[in-house]
Image (cartoon, grey):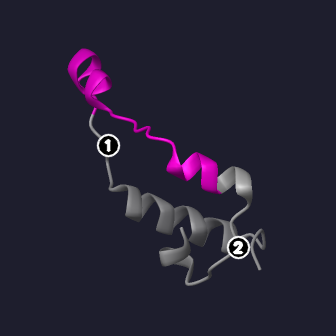
Amino acid sequence: IAKLSGEVNEASRATILQLCTKSWFSISKAEHLLGWRPEMSLEEGMRLSRSWAQDRGLLD
């Protein structure tokens, strides 16, 4: 998010702990059971979401 926004914010202790916890998410079950595939990359989705929020005055 910081890479896309060009802004760096200080992380809280809770954020650091969350980032250090080994976890990940996969769409493989949705792909296998439902034949679902994402229409765009995570990066493109984040860029579009940020643009949408900016257009509506929801971000500084």
Left or right: residue 18 versus residue 43 is: right
The amino acid type of the residue labelled 1 equals: Pro
Quadrant housing residue 6? bottom right
Q: Position of residue 11 (x, y in %)?
A: 68, 66
Q: Is residue 23 above or below residue 45?
A: above
Q: Residue at x 74, y 73 (%)?
A: 59
The image position of residue 29, as x and y in percent, is 29, 21
Earlier along the polypeptide chain: callout 2 or callout 1?
Answer: 2
Q: Nearer the viewer, residue 22 or 30?
A: 22
Going 31% across and 48% down the picture, which residue do you hit?
39
Residue at disc 1, secondary structure:
loop
Q: Per the image, is 41 magenta?
A: no
Disc ID at residue 38:
1
Residue toward you, 32 or 13: 13
Can you say whether 33 is above or below 9 in the image? above
The residue at the point 26 percent across, 28 percent down is 28
> Where residue 14 sits: x, y (%)?
71, 50
Left or right side of 7 for 56: right
Image location of residue 55, percent across then percent down: 68, 74
| Label 1 CA crowd tier, 10 Å (few <14, some 14–19, many 20+) | few
Three-letter residue code for mark 2: Glu
Mark 2 or 1: the one toward you: 2
**37 relative to 42, above or below:** above
Q: CA distance from mark 2 to mark 1?
A: 31 Å
Left or right: residue 57 compared with residue 4: right
Q: Residues within 10 Å of mark 2 (few under 14, many from 20)?
A: few
Residues in magenta, as a range? 16-36
Q: Specify the farthest residue to the bottom.
A: 6
Say which quadrant the C terminus sits in: bottom right
Residue displayed at 62% across by 56% down: 16
Residue wearing tag 2: 10
